[in-house]
Amino acid sequence: MEIFHEIKTVKLYTFINRIKNELEQRGLLENEYIDPIELSEIDSMHYMGQSVMDDIISTMSLTPKTNVLDVGSGFGGTARLLSTMSQCQVTALELQEDIHDIAEFLTKKCKLDDHVKHVTGDIIDLNLDEIGGGTNSYDGLVSLLVFLHIKDKLTLLQRCASMLKPGGTIFVEDYYRRSPFTDEENKRLTKDVFAFNLLTQEEYMAHLEAAGFTNIQFIDKSDDWTYFVHERLFKFMYNQVYFEEVHDKPTYNSLLHFYNSVALLFSGKNLGGVRIIAQKSSEEEINLDTNNA
């Protein structure tokens, strides 16, 4: 399809033509309709598969009346799954225009463009009133393995809070710093993973509170994710021949390097994984805080 001929090689998503290659390999690209559940085997970049979607839906009690913002939506897999599984409305915000274009194309293929709206922009400096319903309009905000790429964590969290209705829920999965990184780990984080300014648990909690969140749950996922990234690496190596036939050797080597770097980082135990669930302070709590200031 023409949309895939416009892909650029960008620093966070090199060799992204693999989405097209996988669709062609499975005979899906020319179909009028693609099942978003089947597509999620190709387009989802979070850890732990569909179980995360189940957790988001139950945590946020998603319904057809729920309005969700997905920050850093990538190829749109999370947005499409949430909408398919709960019928909620999702605004999918993605920084990179070529990724955004593919995501929008795939959403139309899944016949979900009435439920999933794709928007391109950077949440740090975007005019938030121009997307979806704007500030103070979303029931929930989701972001999976995206915050680690953004340097200014406090401003990021403040911008996220501004998008939520009072009492709205944030569901984030991210990396955090369990203990100081070695020089080699810092190099892998910045050069291979493009992860910047990772916070400790204490720093993260303080930033969330400063941004206006309450009822904060900081759920350590380090052990689960360590197992996941190692299993991902071993499966990828096992399927080398198939992968190189569908794609090519440079793409395989690039992903192998990335998967290996992430596995080594989690093995060192200085890098941690976290699921954060919190609520934006209600109007009553905000007024109380103002009165006590």
Image (spheres, rainbow, N blue to C red):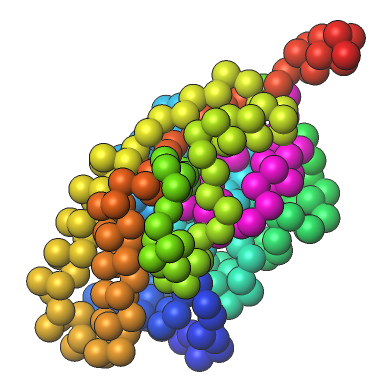
Between residue 46 and residue 59, name the one nearer to us. 46
Residue for point 38% across, 65% down: 184
Residue 43 visible? The answer is no
Residue for point 33% across, 57% down: 265
Residue for point 53% across, 49% down: 198
Would residue 22 be found to the left or right of residue 79 on screen? left
Q: Quadrant of residue 164?
A: top right
Q: Position of residue 21 (x, y in %)?
A: 32, 82
Between residue 187 and residue 272, name the one nearer to us. 187
Between residue 135 and residue 270, name the one nearer to us. 270
Residue 181 visible? The answer is yes
Between residue 222 and residue 30, name the one nearer to us. 222
Residue 156: say if magenta: yes
Q: Position of residue 50 (x, y in %)?
A: 31, 46
Q: Position of residue 109 (x, y in %)?
A: 46, 68
Count numbered badges in the picture: 0
Q: Quadrant of residue 179?
A: top left
Q: Position of residue 170 (x, y in %)?
A: 58, 34
Q: Is residue 214 above or below residue 247?
A: above
Q: Quadrant of residue 262?
A: bottom left
Q: Quadrant of the C terminus?
A: top right
Q: Is residue 254 above or below residue 79?
A: below
Would residue 144 be found to the left or right of residue 127 on screen? left
Residue 97: say if magenta: no
Residue for point 78% across, 11% down: 284
Task: Write the start and end of the magenta stretch as one range.
Answer: 138-166
